[in-house]
Image: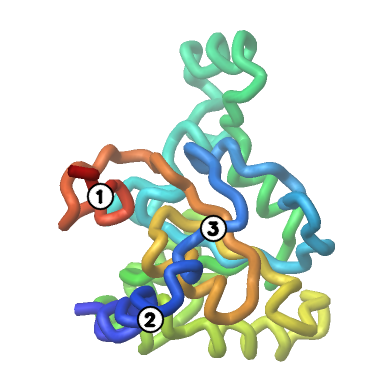
Amino acid sequence: MNISGTLNAFRILTRPSLCIPHLTVSTFDRIPIPIHGSGWPDIRAIVLDKDNCFAVPKENNIYKHYNARLCRHNFFSKFRASNDSNFHKEHFQALRKAYPGPRLVIVSNSAGTGEDPDGRDADILERNTRVKVFRHSTKKPGCGIDVLKYFRAMPETGVRRASDIAVVGDRLFTDVMMANLMGAWSIWVKDGIVVRNGIVSNPESFQPQNG
């Protein structure tokens, strides 16, 4: 259960702008690298969500179309890549190269949380991605302060304030809200990898009807 998400959801009633992203993309491979937006400063570090962002939900691997190692020997992928300049089979590696070492961190609401008490999922995810998985007891959107402290503790990240950070994720009520609460920039991955239907499984899709 995400107690942090439940408690912070009430803030939307008075501050609906907390769930408005600064930049929206359809899928992970449409994220600009280096990350930028209109009026944005130089982004020094990235917080990356896992499920339905760069990985299939509940899996601890990079989705095959974003992972050059899995696509390298796939003829169809090569053919598609040669005919579609927007198809980025190396997008995850490109992001890691642009934000090396501690400048890129995975903050999941599954791996590295109380749902992963022995840290097994976090360890597997780190091995498969070669990216640090943030360990946290408070789930998003409530762990923003801890994330900022993590970056600030390492001078090599260049992070001095929350506005030096961009948060990438598929959830308005966790990823985008955390970014806005902490004063960071947010990128909403609107469609993700797996299509979710219904207000319970995908509350971001709910559109009030007039009349």
- Circle 2 is placed at which residue position? 11
Q: Earlier in the sequence, mark 1 or mark 2?
A: 2
**Amino acid under label 3?**
Pro
Residue at point 60%, 15% (across, down): 84
Give the numbered dot on residue 167.
none
Reading the image, the residue beneath label 1 is 208
Provide the secondary structure element on which disc 1 rests.
loop
Q: Whole-Å distance between the Cαs marked 3 and 1? A: 19 Å
Q: Residues within 10 Å of mark 3 (few under 14, many from 20)?
A: many
Horizontal placement of 111 versus 153: left or right?
left
Which residue is drawn at the image coordinates 48% and 47% (left, top)?
Answer: 189
Q: Residues within 10 Å of mark 1 (few under 14, many from 20)?
A: few
Three-letter residue code for mark 1 = Pro
| Residue at x 57%, y 55% (from the top left corner) | 187
Kind of residue at badge 2: Arg
Of the pair 114 and 27, the residue shown nearer to us: 27
Vertical comparison of 62 with 4: above or below: above
Q: Position of residue 137 (x, y in %)?
A: 36, 88
Quadrant of residue 92 in the image? Answer: top right
Write down the residue under mark 3: 21
Q: Residue at left 58%, top 61%?
A: 186
Front tag of 3 and 1: 1
Q: Nearer the viewer, mark 1 or mark 2?
A: 1
Indicate whether 151 appears above or below 69: below
Total marks in image? 3
Image location (x, y in percent) of residue 72: 56, 26
